[in-house]
Image (tube, rainbow, N blue to C red):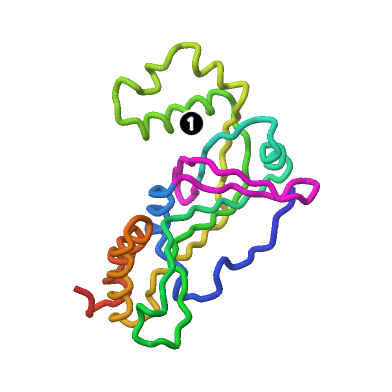
């Protein structure tokens, strides 16, 4: 099993999130993540899956499932160590929104990288993962996991396999204009709100942290 060298996700400390509760909350809010690894041949394999997060003591664990007999399934089996990338909304920030025009523009985004070791799970654990994913997202009580046709889940089991990742390292970048002036920050929020869609979601995340970025000044 190969263990890769830890390389910082982003070099500028003002954007690196240190609050572990905020990082966990982000991972729960945006659970659809990319899982990637380097297989035994040196090829990069990756897939995107919804993940269940649990904390046992100080240990973060992620559970999900993937399709069998795929390149990434084979790669995860041989690699052991994986990188999981959680991403939130993102949007461009234009120079014209800032008072100081000596600024080429940038991109606001939020992301968490979790590294750890992936192991595949027995069938009973896979069924529990399927149940948690379905019941955790289903809004209609008549469509809960327990009410699925008796032959439905058994028909899936042979095609997918559940896994668990024991996380060994987590780092986060919440790049939300916290390095700009308060006036530039507020104008950027306004312009992102005007654009709507994903840009408005970035503005929402910025506003949620405004008092942290500008203590004593934000209202």
Q: Is residue 49 magenta?
A: yes
Q: Residue at x 57, y 24 (%)?
A: 123
Image quarter of residue 103: bottom left
Closest to the observer, 141 or 118:
141
Q: Residue at x 36, y 23 (%)?
A: 144
Q: Does 139 sit left or right of 120 as displayed?
A: left
* Vertical relation: 9 (above or below) 218: above
Q: Does 2 sit left or right of 46 as displayed?
A: right
Q: Residue at x 48, y 62 (%)?
A: 172
* Vertical relation: 213 (above or below) 19: below
| Residue 132 place in picture, x, y as percent | 42, 31
Q: Is residue 191 magenta?
A: no
Q: Decide: few, some or many residues near mark 1? Use Cα within 10 Å; few <14, some 14-19, many ≥20.
A: many
Q: Which residues are magenta?
A: 31-60
Determine the secondary structure under disc 1: helix
The residue under label 1 is 129
| Residue 63 place in picture, x, y as percent | 52, 39
Residue that extends furthest to the right in the rendered view of this protein: 41
| Residue 168 place in picture, x, y as percent | 57, 53
Closest to the observer, 92 or 166:
92
Chief SS of the magenta region: strand
Closest to the observer, 183 or 55:
183
| Residue 189 place in picture, x, y as percent | 30, 69
Q: Residue at x 55, y 74 (%)?
A: 11
């Amino acid at each position: 099993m190969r263990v890769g060298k830890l390389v910082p996700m982003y070099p500028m400390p003002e954007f690196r999130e240190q609050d572990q509760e905020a990082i966990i909350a982000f991972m729960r809010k945006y659970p659809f993540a990319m899982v990637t690894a380097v297989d035994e041949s040196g090829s990069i394999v990756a897939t995107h899956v919804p993940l269940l997060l649990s904390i046992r003591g100080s240990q973060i664990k992620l559970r999900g499932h993937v399709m069998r007999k795929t390149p990434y399934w084979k790669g995860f089996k041989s690699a052991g160590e994986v990188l999981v990338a959680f991403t939130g909304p993102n949007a461009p920030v234009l120079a014209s929104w800032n008072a100081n025009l000596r600024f080429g523009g940038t991109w606001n985004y939020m992301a968490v990288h979790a590294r750890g070791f992936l192991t595949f799970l027995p069938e009973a654990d896979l069924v529990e993962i399927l149940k948690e994913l379905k019941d955790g997202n289903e809004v209609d009580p008549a469509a809960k996991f327990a009410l699925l046709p008796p032959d439905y889940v058994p028909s899936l089991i042979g095609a997918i396999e559940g896994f668990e990742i024991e996380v060994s390292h987590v780092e986060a970048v919440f790049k939300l204009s916290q390095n700009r002036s308060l006036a530039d920050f507020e104008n950027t929020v306004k312009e992102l709100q005007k654009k709507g869609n994903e840009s408005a979601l970035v503005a929402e995340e910025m506003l949620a942290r405004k008092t942290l970025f500008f203590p004593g000044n934000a209202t």
